[in-house]
């Protein structure tokens, strides 16, 4: 595990972030996207998260390659800006090593330092490993959008979870 570092995302990491996003999205089961956005869209997303005092972290391996990310994008509307939405993913070869737990813990710590009071996320009901991780971290289920997604002829519920800081 010492071969991996969790760092704040910089412009130099955006291409690696976009690659991770593409790989995770292509799995068609962990996140809502089924393909990555353009490089320009990913770059703009990272810049927006950072400029809005949100959190964007990446996990890099010993070679400096990005193998995962976690972001907490602050809500922009007045009255909601004490909270943000979490998104994360790891490349398949980086899973099962405790990196997800370390990554989300680091992101939550950074969010706390930036004044967040609430973090929420959506996770597919079929993604039992992620749901278990979120529960161990302290997220609580707040609701379920039943049959929210229908992809490749299969329905999946969208579980809404929240964490109060």
Image (cartoon, rainbow, N blue to C red):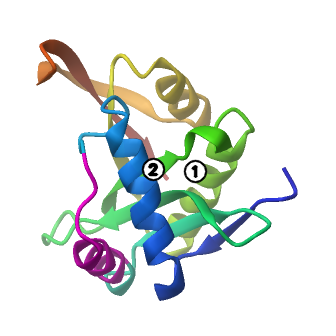
> Which of the two labelled residues, at mark 2 and mark 1, occupies the earlier sequence position?
2
Q: Residue furthest right?
A: 2
Q: Residue 45 location, x and y as percent?
A: 28, 73
Q: Locate residue 3, reporting x and y percent.
A: 84, 59
Who is closer to the viewer here, 19 or 123?
A: 19
| Front disc: 2 or 1 | 2
Residue 88 shows which numbered tag? 2
Q: Tell me the magenta residue range.
A: 35-49
Q: Is residue 83 above or below residue 144?
A: below
Q: Which residue is mark 1?
A: 104
Residue 57, given in percent of the width and then of the height, sits at 54, 67
Q: Please tell me whether mark 2 sits on a helix, a strand or a loop.
A: strand
Work out which residue is located at the far top of the displayed protein and give it: 154
How many numbered marks are there? Answer: 2
Crowding at mark 1 (Cα within 10 Å: few <14, some 14-19, many 20+): many
Residue found at x 30% / y 71%:
42
**Cα–Cα span, label 2 and label 1:** 8 Å
Drawn side of residue 24 relative to residue 39, left or right? right
């Amino acid at each position: 595990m010492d071969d991996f570092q969790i760092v704040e995302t910089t412009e130099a990491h955006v291409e690696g972030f976009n690659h991770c996003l593409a790989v995770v999205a292509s799995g068609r089961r962990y996140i809502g996207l089924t393909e990555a956005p353009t490089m320009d869209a990913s770059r703009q997303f990272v810049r927006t998260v950072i400029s809005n005092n949100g959190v964007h972290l990446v996990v890099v391996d010993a070679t400096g390659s990005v193998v995962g990310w976690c972001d907490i994008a602050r809500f922009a509307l007045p009255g909601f800006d004490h909270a943000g939405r979490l998104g994360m993913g790891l490349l398949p070869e980086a899973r099962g090593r405790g990196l997800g737990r370390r990554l989300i813990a680091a992101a939550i710590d950074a969010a706390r330092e930036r004044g967040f009071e609430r973090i929420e996320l959506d996770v597919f009901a079929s993604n039992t490993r992620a749901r278990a991780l979120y529960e161990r971290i302290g997220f609580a289920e707040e609701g379920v959008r039943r049959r929210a997604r229908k992809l490749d002829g299969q329905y999946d519920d969208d579980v809404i979870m929240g964490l109060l800081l």
